[in-house]
Image: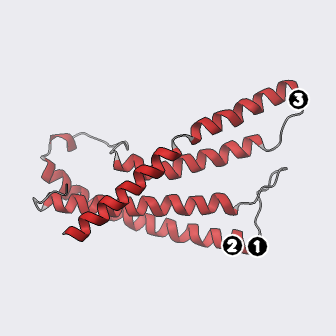
Amino acid sequence: MRAIQAFVLAVEAMTRFVGRCSMYLIFVMMGVLLYSSISKGFFNPSIWTLETAQFLMVAYFLLGGAYSMQLDAHVRMDLIYSRWAPRTRAMVDSVTILLLIFFLVFLLYGGISSTSYALEYGETSYSAWSPPMAPIKILMCVGIGLMLLQTIATLCRDVAQALGRPLR
């Protein structure tokens, strides 16, 4: 039980750190979009701004997903769930989270395959700017991997709660 608790605490600390750091990407994205607006009005428009903002949004979304899950901030259809006892919720969550783990494993497998292709063949975007795709695909795999780890940590927490032995 101590090993599981250490795993959960380590994953949640890493998730919290990455999530809080990735929160600031929104300000970087806003700066890029502000520069884009100003450059379109007063200078020669930049070809890199829109795609950079899209890449920043992808990084923001994927790196922050695990932190959102840790905070239990995801959207949930809550018709009867809120009426259940915490132990019943944990039992139901323990079963349904297995589907999420299954999905994330396949998503990570596809992400790794796509990333290796981008690295091997020097894949670039089909835009006028044509940036390399490998960096954003690597971030995609990191975000999915972090989400998978947080999902497993949440499963461990839910199983312990369902057994009546909640983790710290």
Q: Quadrant of the N terminus?
A: bottom left
Do the numbered discs 3 and 1 sit on residues whose CB atoms are within 8 Å?
Answer: no
Q: CA distance from mark 3 to mark 1?
A: 35 Å
Q: Nearer the viewer, mark 3 or mark 2?
A: 3
Q: Quadrant of the C terminus?
A: bottom left
Picture coordinates of residue 123, whole percent (x, y)? 75, 66
Q: Nearer the viewer, residue 59 or 22?
A: 22
Pointer 1: residues within 10 angstroms few (<14), some, or many (20+)? few
Up the image or down, 139 lies above or below 83; here it is below
Q: Which mark is residue 43?
A: 3
Picture coordinates of residue 56, whole percent (x, y)? 63, 46
Q: Give the left or right position of residue 106, taking residue 51 as reference.
A: left
Secondary element at tag 2: helix
Residue drawn at (41%, 63%), measured in percent from left and top?
Answer: 148
Do the numbered discs 1 and 2 sit on residues whose CB atoms are within 8 Å?
Answer: yes
Secondary element at tag 1: helix
Picture coordinates of residue 128, whole percent (x, y)? 85, 50
The residue identified by callout 1 is 121
Picture coordinates of residue 63, whole percent (x, y)? 51, 52
The residue identified by callout 2 is 117
Q: CA distance from mark 3 to mark 2?
A: 37 Å
Secondary element at tag 3: loop
Q: Nearer the viewer, residue 18 or 54?
A: 18
Sequence-earlier tag: 3 or 1:
3
The kind of residue on which mark 3 rests is Phe
Up the image or down, 45 lies above or below 108; here it is above
Residue drawn at (55%, 46%), measured in percent from left and top?
Answer: 60
The kind of residue on which mark 2 rests is Tyr
